[in-house]
Image: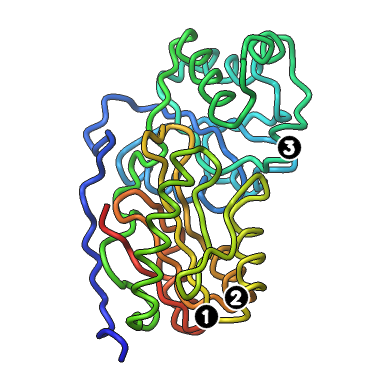
Amino acid sequence: MREPYSLRLFVQKPRFPVTSSDHPFATLGIIAGNGSYPFAMVKAARAAGVERIVAAAFENETDPALAGLVDEIEWMRVGQLGRLVKTFSSRKVGHAIMAGQIAPGNLFDLRPDLKAFLILAKLRERNAESIFGAIGDELAKAGVQLLPATTFMQEHLAGVGAFAGPGLSRRESEDVRFGFGIAKEVSRLDIGQTVVVKGGTVLAVEGFDGTNATITRGGGLGKGGAVVVKVSKPNQDFRFDVPVIGPATLETAAEAQIRVIAMEAGRTLLLERERLAEMAARHKISLFGIEP
């Protein structure tokens, strides 16, 4: 028996700071990665009353169409930290948000400028978290405060329970609970934030290859009917890294014959929510928010 279909869109209050519509600034800087996240951020910021948006965009990452939605845009390659800082400081940007990912291959294959080179030389560990943390420190020195990447995006956070697609069977519900525990432990060890499970067995764990590759691997091993669980890290810095589910995730899950995508409620962003609901119904994939 499947549990009744639910359309609850309750959004749990996040456990990290967000900026409300009465923000104290008129200019916002956006560090724009790939995908639709930067576009959603611009729309949400405008709705909250931000008057001027300056985007730092990256070659081979940022969608060029973003230029038509912001007031100013500066193009650079990944690794030009000095140029990034100057882009905001020269335009008197006091607050900035990272929106959209940088492909792991580009992040770790970057050609650093002098400022980035000096910072990288000081890092004991060169992972995404340490690199972005160092970038945040450099921006702070220039008077630019990095805000949580969920700022203005409260309405895009996943709610609790099933909110799109079919309801969950008892077996799928058990796999969600099982996968959540495994994913939390894996994320605590800073290995990854996504696992694929089926019938109480772990099929795939996220590594350097990223979420979509993990879904493809796990789905292939499961041969249909597997469950994907995505969570946040225990001490996740939401300025740099936010769990995100978007249309590309759904397309990958459909190709891998995934049955359920479960995510941590209040801590996972849903991009293009209406499209996600339509895709979930069409592909018969359940979207489920797990209460932290």
Q: Quick check: 146 above or below 212?
A: above
Which is in the foreground here, disc 3 or disc 1? 1
Secondary structure at badge 1 equals loop
Q: Secondary structure at mark 2?
A: helix
The answer to which quarter of the image holds residue 255 is: bottom right
- Which of the 4 image quarters holds residue 171? bottom left
Figure check: 49 above or below 113: below
Name the spot of residue 236 as percent of width and height, x first.
Answer: 40, 36
What separation in Å lies between label 3 and label 1 (alpha carbons)?
Answer: 33 Å
What's the amino acid at mark 3?
Answer: Asn
Name the outermost residue toward the bottom.
1
Q: Earlier in the sequence, mark 3 or mark 1?
A: 3
Query: Residue 176: where, in percent of width, then height?
Result: 38, 67
- Residue shown at the point (44%, 17%) measured from the top left: 144
The reply to whether callout 1 and callout 2 are in contact (CB within 8 Å) is: yes
Q: Amino acid at mark 2?
A: Gly
> Residue beneath label 1, please?
225
Q: Earlier in the sequence, mark 3 or mark 2?
A: 3
Q: Which residue is mark 3?
A: 106
Image side of residue 257 versus residue 164, left or right: right
Q: Residues within 10 Å of mark 3 (few under 14, many from 20)?
A: some
What residue did someone put label 2 on? 222
Tell me if label 3 and label 2 are in contact, CB under 8 Å: no
